[in-house]
Amino acid sequence: MERKTDWPVFLISGGFLVLFVIASLIQADFVADLVDLTFGWATSYFGAFWQVLMVFIFAVAIGLMISRYGHVRLGVQDRPDIKNFKWIAMIITTLMAGGGVFWAAAEPVSHFLETPPMYDMPPGEEATITPALAQSFLDWGFLAWAVNGTLATVVIMYGQSKGMPLKPRILLYPIFGEKIMGKSALGTLVDAFSIVAVAAGTIGPIGFLGLQAAYMMDDLFGIPNALITQLAVVLGLVLIAAISAMTGVHKGIQFLSRFNVIFALVLSVIILLIGPGRFIIDQFIGSYGIYVQDFLRLAFYRGDEGWLSQWTLFFWGWFIGYAPMMAIFISRISHGRTLRELFLAVIIIAPLVMNFWFTVVGGTGIFNELQNPGSVGGPLEEGGQAAAINAIVTQLPLGFWIAVGFLLVTIVFVATTADTLSYTISITISGKDNPPRMMRVFWAIMMGAAASMLIVLGEGSVDALQSFIVVTAVPVSLILLPTLWLAPRVAKKMAKEQRIK
């Protein structure tokens, strides 16, 4: 199959994002109101569907992993060409982006100060720690990771083994065959929706990084938290992401991912040693037990729709929007892996690492709040997520240096997501596993430029784009639905081809 630049997809996806920014420049309030309206519509009418979809994807993935199909080797190679640690590091850092520090600090503390509605406990007391962490584990745990790298990845890698280019439309290849991969209006829309969703989901964290890093730099170094500082942070991040994306999977992306995982592990160990280490470990184990025990109750909770939209459905809409492009990236780096290896990494190892990181960061915040009420909750209420991490770590011994470490790890988390997804969008548009370098750089710069314009317009515009991510999850969730039966079907075909009994 001929592989060339897909201009219709490029023009639709790129044009839509440019239109969003221009509309925000002309009528920011109108755009914000429109996004709020469509956000409410999406969570009201699709929220229950997303919850059921997430649980079913996880259940089917677990079934495939423990079945004989776990032995199926994916892709077009007999052996993987990326070592285990580097491979898992790239998977973890790409999705952690915004959650790496923004939400790891803010979400557990927020749930501690305002008990999740499915638990009947007074806020801010010791008994509330477990539900606060269990809810955070649900939002960023097994289900979040399953939707991003299991069934969709299997379908994509099956299509790739048949010579199809890496594009989101490959998810429908088992249904429509090669005609979906050619000049197909449906295929073009699938690719364009997937790119818009993942670009919006990356521009948002870039914008928030500019706001958070500028706040941290003001607090730590006295550098004024002004527009110029916020834009300078975004410029630095885009330069890192562009250089990394340009050098590709085996150099820049791999290096940044490995660096960030190692650095985050070092920070975790330091906090465990000089901070409330025993408290963190005890709460992680105890809360994980409650998370597993209450898993379905939490996953299917439908009581307080306003609360759900603010937390679980917001995150899950974000992850669903990421799913096709994340699956393409994971497919690109997972040739030669067995289905079982892939699923173990994505739905067991990655969520455990993510949830432990949330306990280290957010759990330390809860500990500080218990010891000194208002020491974290006050800054969180006044300054938002940007204030949470500094309020938490500056209370530790060597707090200044740990805060500097978190500033660095935050920048690299978001840079790793930006470089990976610039690379992945370029794969989709070019149809090539190693897309042109200038195309990779273009998407990194474009996402940074869009984030910068939204920062100029004010934090409300960045919030509007972040809410828009959830709206894009509506069409993407419909694209993902067929993977529930297509993934087992293609796994069966691959098992037969590989003579696995």
Image (cartoon, rainbow, N blue to C red):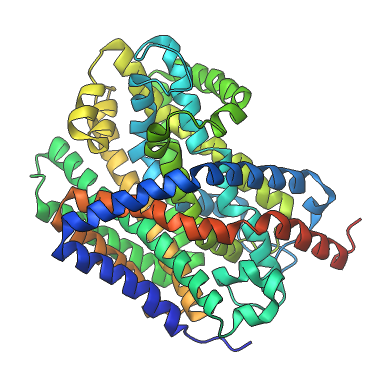
Count how many numbered circles sit on residues in the image.
0
Q: Is residue 90 above or below residue 173?
A: above
Q: Is residue 71 left or right of residue 218?
A: right
Q: Is residue 440 left or right of residue 176?
A: left
Q: Is residue 155 left or right of residue 383?
A: right
Q: Quadrant of the N terminus?
A: bottom right
In the image, residue 447 lies at what x, y percent? 31, 65
Give the quadrant of residue 199.
Answer: bottom left
Residue at x 36% of width, y 59% of height:
200
Q: Is residue 353 left or right of residue 10?
A: right
Q: Quadrant of the C terminus?
A: bottom right
Residue 319 can be seen in this image = yes
The residue furthest bottom is 2
Give the quadrant of residue 314.
Answer: top left
Q: Is residue 441 above or below residue 279?
A: below
Q: Is residue 141 above or below residue 202?
A: above
In the image, residue 288 lies at what x, y percent? 56, 24
Residue 419 can be seen in this image = no
In the image, residue 369 lies at what x, y percent? 30, 17
Give the quadrant of residue 78.
Answer: bottom right
In the image, residue 189 lies at what x, y percent? 49, 73
Between 437 and 348, which is closer to the camera in this rendering?
Answer: 348
Residue at x 64% of width, y 69% of height:
172
Between 176 and 257, which is closer to the camera in this rendering?
Answer: 176
Residue at x 71% of width, y 67% of height:
158
